[in-house]
Amino acid sequence: MIKLTGVSKVYGRGQAAVQALKDVTLEIKRNEFVAVMGPSGSGKSTFLSILGCLERPSGGEYCFDGRQVSSMSEDELAVLRNRRIGFIFQTFNLLPRFNILRNVELPLAYTGVPRKERRERAAALLTRVGLAHRLQHKPPELSGGEQQRVAIARALVTDPPLILADEPTGNLDSRTSHEIMAIFRELHKEGRTIIIVTHEPDIARYAGRILHFLDGTVVREEVTVQ
Ligand code: ADP
Ligand code: ADP
């Protein structure tokens, strides 16, 4: 599904240039569950941004589903991001003034799915993550764990094969974190490909494979026993 060959990323130029990634070569197969670990500044978020086509590599090649990302137009990349990839963030990134049903529906807004079906899909996903009784609530009325469930439902509404999560449990207590990870485990069992960035070894252990980053590159890989 994902193939990186000698990928690098440089931010800025001249004296201010920062090499965030260097020479990253790896493959991630469909239905893998991968955790990305490493110290702050080691390139984890940059790696995820490139995988999610939010940024383009400065060098090297990124193939997603057999297509060269560097050869795709901005419009093609936007379609890929919207239909093939679900994003989940540490800070949830929900719209505080909209109720959670509308938050979850939103990624379907410009996909041609009729309004009634958008609503039904959003409600079904919110039910699945245990929030059927909260559809009319707004994000600030919910706990952190509940907001992350909403964010997961939103990421799933386009039924993407790939889920990218940057520190999804970073703002949650330990018990809530494990509840959220139990949802990721289910999504993986359903056949989705999951890649999460985390600082916490307990959380990384949900993945079958752990990539350790240091100074912009993968220095060690670990296969976990499930
Ligand atoms: P991590 O997620 O492991 O903390 P990042 O990928 O955020 O690491 O950052 C890797 C390096 O790239 C750091 O030195 C960071 O300061 C730098 N960096 C990240 N994003 C930018 C940016 N938009 N502009 C300039 N430098 C950046
Ligand atoms: P947690 O135990 O995860 O920290 P909270 O203590 O924040 O959760 O919230 C406990 C319950 O109270 C949750 O079900 C949440 O939805 C509800 N709640 C929290 N803040 C508000 C609020 N401002 N308005 C309405 N309900 C709230």
Image (cartoon, rainbow, N blue to C red):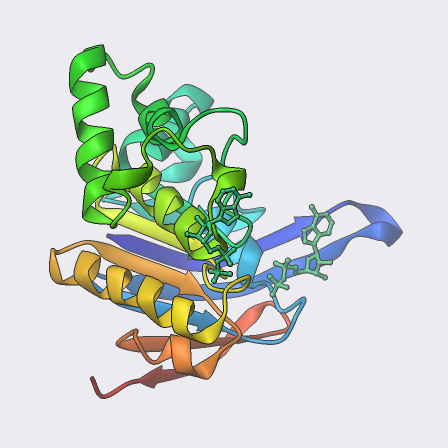
Q: Is residue 200 above or below residue 167?
A: below
Q: Residue most toward the bottom?
A: 225
Relative image position of residue 132 (x, y in whole percent): 24, 40
The quarter in which the C terminus is drawn is bottom left
In the image: residue 205, left or right of residue 55: left
Which corner quadrant of the image does residue 12 belong to? top right
Q: Is residue 72 visible?
A: no
Along the viewing direction, whichever of 126 and 19 lies nearer the viewer: 126
Along the viewing direction, whichever of 218 and 102 lies nearer the viewer: 102
In the image: residue 24, left or right of residue 223: right
Number of residue marks: 0
Please report the residue visible at 26 percent of the width from the left and 76 percent of the height from the top: 208
Relative image position of residue 149 (x, y in whole percent): 35, 49
Relative image position of residue 82 (x, y in whole percent): 34, 30
Please report the residue visible at 27 percent of the width from the left and 61 percent of the height from the top: 184
Relative image position of residue 148 (x, y in whole percent): 42, 51
In the image: residue 55, left or right of residue 206: right
